[in-house]
Image: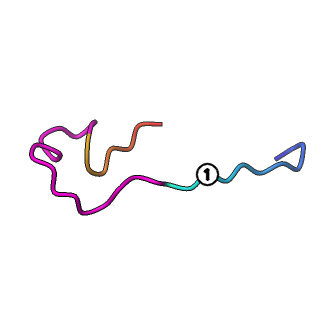
Amino acid sequence: SIKGVALIALDTSPRGLNVEGETDSWDLGAGAGLF
């Protein structure tokens, strides 16, 4: 970047919980990619 600053954020989303309905919607649940 212009200022020489980098922001690093870890993805702390739980994996493999197999919650009922977690894959029913593309924008909420497993693999949601809205930031």
Label 1: element kind: loop
Percent of width and height locating residue 28: 27, 37
Q: Is residue 6 left or right of residue 18?
A: right
Percent of width and height locating residue 24: 12, 41
Residue at horizontal 81 percent and vertical 47 percent from the top: 1
Give the extent of the magenta segment.
12-28
**Main SS of the magenta segment?**
loop
Q: Is residue 29 left or right of residue 6?
A: left
The residue type indicated by label 1 comes to: Ala
Camera-side residue: 3 or 15? 15
Residue at horizontal 22 percent and vertical 58 percent from the top: 17
Q: How many marks?
A: 1
Residue at horizontal 77 percent and vertical 51 percent from the top: 6
- Quarter of the rendering containing residue 3: top right
Report if residue 27 lies within the magenta region.
yes
Q: Which residue is mark 1?
A: 9
The residue most toward the bottom is: 16
